[in-house]
Amino acid sequence: MLLQRDTWSKAEYEQAAHAAIERLASHVDSSQRGERPAVAQPSIEDNIEALELRSLIRGGGLDSRRFSDFLGDYLERTTRLHHPGSLAHQVASPDIPAALADLIHGAINDTAAIYEMGAAGATIELVVLEWMLEKVGWSPDRSAGVLTHGGSLANLTALLAARARVAPDAWEQGTPADLAVLAPPSVHYSVRRAVSILGLGERAVCELEVDELERIRVDRLGDALERVRADGRRPMALVAASCATATGLHDDLNGIADFCERNGIWLHTDAAHGASALLSPKHRELLDGIDRSDSVIWDAHKMLRTSSLCAAVLMRSGADLMGAFHQKASYLFYDDQDSEGVDFIGRAFECTKGAIGMKLFLNLAWRGEHGLGAYVGDCYDKTLRFHELISARPGFECPYSPESNILCFRYGRDGSRQVAIREHLIAQGEFHISSAEIGGERYLRIVPTAPATDDETIERLLDAIEEADRGLD
């Protein structure tokens, strides 16, 4: 039998894959050693020219021999999440097992939405979800979940389920205009986006009163409910953070759950970043009360060292998740369907949903639950140590003691100067940090996730900030 021209070539794949592995291994190794910049931002036109993007798109010609050089150039023009100075965002430095999962998926392209399209991947997702539900404190027999491509989809799925409970006809009749979502002003932007997507508009978000560090004030929740009702609205859900994106601080979940239970309000906990602390015996108490939520989201690609994206939306009542969607598609569903396995498509937005559970499964299978928990605990502990180093430096100020691996601080009190310092550091390339506002004040912000980040890294960062500030005068 003659092979077609476009048939997969084993030799070509092996040559290109070996080249990729060699380049990527060197990239991660040099990144961990801090030998190259943590962040690179060439101009778009420079990238287009250096990578020959337009000519390659139109003419092709990139083969397994040229690929190694192309990849090398590409890697020089991107951020290095394994770099000790990579401190800006809540994105993991992936572990080896998760990287292997992406290699597998890139070759076979199995999906987990329909069991017949990827039985092994769907089974892995089912078992991973059982494990996550148990970590939250729920029984897989009564609860349910699904993996999604990111926390934004997970938040939207949770609010869809909350809508289905309070307005069961909304899928066919449309979202009632009198629904409201209670949330702190600092709630993740994806929640406001979800509320708008649901057709309510951002004005349906009733902002809760918070303390000076933007944590929900449980003692003022009754006032918020009165405002909602006075506005002629019904509460659809209350969104709590564990932990908050900007500060890494946790809301009082038990206090909030008490209020929600008394008033029959759906409690959604955005634990995209913080739920991984459930694996750390020293830190899991930060999430006390999470099991009293109606829904929880948990991003493995933040603290469990998977590549992007691998997020879970979990619900205490499995029936609530099953009620979030109502699909009709004759090419996927038919009457009296009784297939083997589990079809996740009834729980998720995605139809062609990648087998993303493999990333988390392999990390767990390789490192063990205790290994991942030790990593989370180490990140949290060293961030507390970094807080002590920063607070001890003259001119530096931290507004709080960290509860996670997210820490805000500032040098001086001029908000515009914090932004200018950050931009200078990014232009220099050795350090990649972010910034955030707390109570209207601008701070610098770090999220240590790279294992290579240590005390010496932070001391150098502080030196660099002082030098950058002098250069602004």
Image: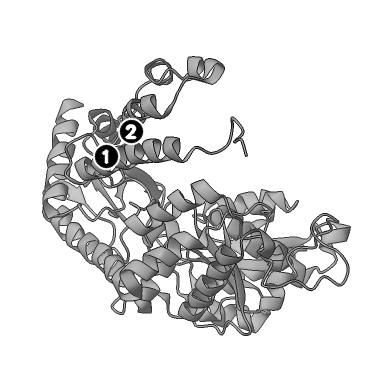
Say above or below: 36 vs 326: above
Q: Is residue 263 above or below residue 414?
A: below
- How dense is the environment of label 2, judged by Cα within 10 Å: few (below 14), some, or many (20 and up)? some
Identify the residue at image location x=17%, y=26%: 471
Between the C-alphas of marks 1 and 2, the distance is: 7 Å
Tag 1 and tag 2, C-beta contact below 8 Å: yes
Residue under the image location 61 percent in, 56 percent down: 111
* Residue 359 appears anywhere in the view: yes
Asked if residue 432 can be seen in this view, the reply is: no
Residue sitting nearer the eye, 1 or 109:
1
Residue bearing mark 1: 27
What is the quadrant of residue 139 in the picture?
bottom right
Q: Which residue is mark 2?
A: 75
**What colouring style does the render use?**
one colour
Location of the C terminus (image quadrant): top left
Location of residue 272 in the rendering, given as x and y in whole percent from the top left corner = 47, 61
**Earlier residue among tags 1 and 2:** 1
Q: Residue at point 86% right, 56% down?
A: 330
Q: Give the residue type at disc 1.
A: His
Q: Position of residue 196 (x, y in %)?
A: 69, 49
User: Which is nearer the eye, 64 or 199?
Assistant: 64
The reply, left or right, for residue 143 in relation to residue 308 is right
Q: Quadrant of the N terminus?
A: top right
Direction from residue 392 to residue 343 in the image, left or right: right
Q: Which picture quadrant has residue 119?
A: bottom right
Up-down: is 196 above or below 183? above
